[in-house]
Every structure is written in structure tokens, then in C-alpha cells.
Amino acid sequence: MTVYERLEISPGILSWARKTAGYSDAAAAAKKLAVKPEQVQAWEDGMLRPTIVQLRRMGKVYKRPLAVLLLPEPPKDFMPLREFRRMNGNADLSWSPTLQAEFKRAHTQREVVLEIAEVSPSSIVISKSDFKIKSTMSAEDAGSHIRQLIGIDQWDSSIRGDPRLALRAAVTAVEQLGVLILQTRGVSIKEMRGFSISDWPYPVIALNGSDWPRPRLFTLIHELTHLALNAGGICDLHETSKQSNLEQDRVERYCNEVAGAALMPAAALLANRIVASRPKWDLDLLGDICGGFSTSSEALLLRLIDLGNAGWDDYRRLKPQLDALYEDARKREKARQKAQKSGPSFYVVKARDLGHNYVIGVLDAFQSRAISSYDVADYLDVKYNQLPKLCAALTP
């Protein structure tokens, strides 16, 4: 196939791709594609066939893999996520364009994995479902089950003491269950801490890459619980008192409790000397404890509330201080990065955002000649000559 060869595209595919990408008319898409609106309309009407270069350009603009644009008919588009967020100080619960793009990317990556699972099964980790739980299971039992799946008890002190290593160990373990884990960029944590897509096989967990490692670890287990319940959705991990009887709050509260139990088993936490003394809680006391459980001070406080060793009055008193501490830490981190004029390389961030297992699977399928050089670059959203650097970024 040459770059000048024109391809016959099934009717409806291109208009479907344009509309689901948020371009309501051909003129808006044409501007992004750098062509005339009449040309976009001719492609969609089947009056003009696009070249492979033009089709790849459409794939980039419409945020769809090339393989999707070559399908015989438009796929059934994804269903909206269940909404587990609350107002929680936000003006509304609408989705920002960035969040919409990241949600679409999650579905696109899953479509790619499903395709590779057919053409090169050995390239993809087999999706397992042995971590499914029922909501009738106690949060302590469910947390213990997930703790064993992730292997938290096998972490040595170096992992427990380093939030980044703890997060990496947990992500690796969850990926081995056949769960796709990606991380978002540019989405405010006030809008979303994480979301999950509970379609099987190959369900998806998205973590907010702007968050700190400890909250991301909690979010990972929280979203894994959503998958185990087959109840994927979008979350900001808002606090939910037991007075709320709303279904979404009940599910969200349960996922919070399970994540808390997985990271902070009741027996170990209650045996802590500080906890046993039942003090008047402040940020210093919470900070002294949370590091040993690889969790954040806020998650620890919510766990103490669940166990009856703190109350919602403590949460309301300390929450503004926790938020201020978080914002101050973010400002200091941004100032540090600006002063150093450095940070993770493009390829390290790209591998993290796509998910290491996803990148490895796509590269393996290419090396097995199951997909083309065009496909591997398209699926990984890099130029072909950048693949070696992306591959090198996978090495710890």
C-alpha cells in the first residue's frame, strides 16, 4: 500500500468518528484537518476516497486508531460512565474537554488491546476475573482479599517507605490481572481522582496523573473495587457519611471502605500506639502514622472514622487544613520543577500515561509482525523513529 493509494471506507465510519470526536459539522473538522469542508463532506458521502496519509490525519484529529476507521461499520460507542461524584465544592459535574478526551482514550486503548488479543494473543496478559466480589461481603473481608491479590504483605520496608515504589508495585500487580491502567494528564483532581470501565475482558482503571502517589494508590484500590463489583464509574472519592442512602453514595462509601481496609487493616491500625491512645487528632499525628501504611493523611482519617476512632467533626475540622497542606505542597513542587528546569522525560511520561503493559503488548505484537509499523506508531501515539526511546523508558 502506497501513501497515495486511496482507500474505500465504509459509509458512516467517518461521520461517526467526526461526531463522536465533538465536531458537529464538517467545517469544524475541516479546520483541524487543514482541508476544505467540501472535501470532508465528500469523504463522508463516499464521493472521494481518502489516502492513507489523510486517513491517519483523521485518526489523530478524531482520537481514533486507524484500525477503527477501517472497520466495516461504526462500532457501538461507549456508554457513559456512572456518576459517583458529588458537588463537593465544584460548580457543576459537567465534563471538561480534557476529561472527555481522556475517557475516549481509555476506550480506544481497550479497543486496541481487544484487537491485539485476537491477532497476537501471546502479546497480551490474560484478563482474569478472580478478584470479583459481592457487595454483601464485609469491607474488611473484601479489603483483605484485594490486599492479597496485590501482594501488599510481601512489600519490604523500602517499598512501604517510598510512595512511588508502593504505587508502582500495586500498578504492576493489578496489570497482571489483565486490567488496563492508564494515567490522565491535565485533568484537575477537583474534577476527577479516577475512573473505571468495568467491561470484560480487559477492564480499565484511569488514575489522575496530577495526584500525589499516596492518593493515587488509594484511588487505584478504590477503582479496583469498582471493577470487582462490576460497577465502573467516575469518582472524586468524596467523603460520604453513613447518613446518605443514595445508591451512588452507598457504592462509593463501600469502595472507600474496602480501599481503606486493604491499605490499613483494622488489626494493624488499632494496634498502633497513637491510635490506641485515642488522641485529639491533628495533622502531625496523622502524618506520623500514615507513612507506615502507604496512604495519605486524609485516607487515614476517613479510615479512623470507619473504625470509630475519629468522628466526622474531626474530618470537618481538619479537611480545610488538609486541603491547604496539599495546595502548598503542589505549589512548592511546581516551584522546584521550575527552578530545576527538569522533570521526567517525554517518553517516561508517555509510557506511564499509556500504561507499561499496554506499551509492552503493542510493541510485542509489532515484533511478532501481527501489526504493522503504521499501527504500532498509531497505537502508541509516537513517531516510528521514537519507538526505541519509548521502549527504553519502560526500563525501571
Image (cartoon, rainbow, N blue to C red):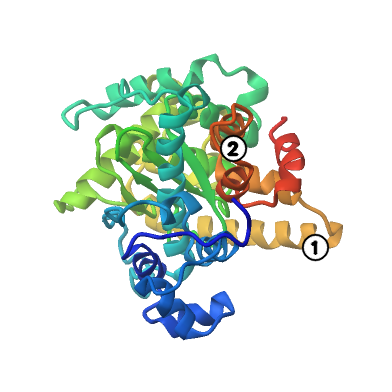
Percent position of residue 234, x then y: 35, 53
In the rendered image, which residue does mark 2 sit on? 359
**Tag in front: 1 or 2:** 2
* Residue 309 vertical placement versus 100 (above, below): above
Percent position of residue 132, x then y: 27, 26
Q: Secondary structure at mark 1?
A: helix
Q: Secondary structure at mark 2?
A: helix
Q: Residue at x 80, y 63 (%)?
A: 338
Name the kind of residue labelled 2 in the image.
Val
Name the kind of residue labelled 1 in the image.
Lys
> Can residue 29 be seen in this snapshot?
yes
Kindly identify which numbered label has been placed on residue 338.
1
- Name the N-terminal-most of marks 1 and 2: 1
* Residue 45 vertical placement versus 147 (above, below): below
Q: Residue at x 42, y 52 (%)?
A: 68
Kindly identify which numbered label has been placed on residue 320.
none
Which is more toward the observer, 132 or 255? 132
